Image: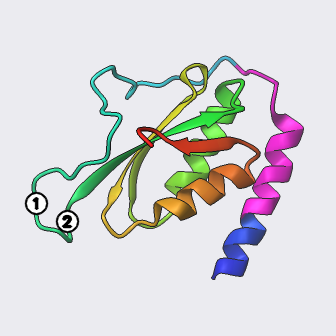
Amino acid sequence: MKKLLLFLCAIALILSLTACGEDEGTGTNPSSSPEMSATSGADEGTDEDAVITTVLSVTGMTCTRCENVVQREVSALDGVISVNAVWDENRVVIKHETGVDVDQIITIIVLEGYTVEREGE
């Protein structure tokens, strides 16, 4: 499974590198809001059903296409509820279940060609 994921990430990286820089101007961020926290925390519910918000600082995104690539690739992971990438703020906000490996999310974004840091660290 990991080999397949790495293979798919490599393919996505190649495709995104050939397409990046062509701002389509069609990407929007309807879920972008200033009240999103820069820390991780659990919403109400049991441990198994808890939702965590992880905020990552991602540099290298230059257009809405970059946002869409990051959102698509991270959203494909099991347990990821929502992804909001904002290229001009260098930020990606991920809502996910507690069992999701944040290091795997970071790896996927890095394989897309971006630099990632966890906010607050």
- In the picture, the quarter occupied by the N terminus is bottom right
Q: Which mark is residue 2?
A: none
Q: Position of residue 94 (x, y in %)?
A: 42, 46
Would you name the residue on which mark 1 appears? 45
Residue ID at (67%, 17%): 25
Q: From the viewer's perspective, tell me whether residue 1 is left or right of residue 13.
A: left
Measured in 3D between alpha carbons, the distance from the residue under mark 2 to the one under mark 1, in whole angstroms, is 6 Å
Q: Nearer the viewer, residue 15 or 95?
A: 95
Rendered position, 20 above or below 8: above
Q: Quadrant of residue 120?
A: top left
Residue 18 magenta: yes
Q: Type of residue at label 2? A: Asp
**Residue 83 picture location, percent across and down:** 45, 43
Which image quadrant for residue 50?
Answer: bottom left
Q: Would you say the residues marked 2 and 1 are in contact, meaning their CB atoms lie under 8 Å apart?
A: yes
Q: Amino acid at mark 1?
A: Gly
* Residue in the picture at 85% in, 41% down: 17
Q: Which residues are magenta?
A: 9-24
Residue indicated by mark 2: 49
Residue neighbourhood size for the residue with mark 2, other residues' Cα within 10 Å, grouped as few (<14), some (14–19), many (≥20): some
Which is more toward the observer, 66 or 36? 36
Q: Image check: 17 left or right of 38? A: right
Please give the name of the residue rendered at 61% of the width and 44% of the height, measured from the top-left corner.
116
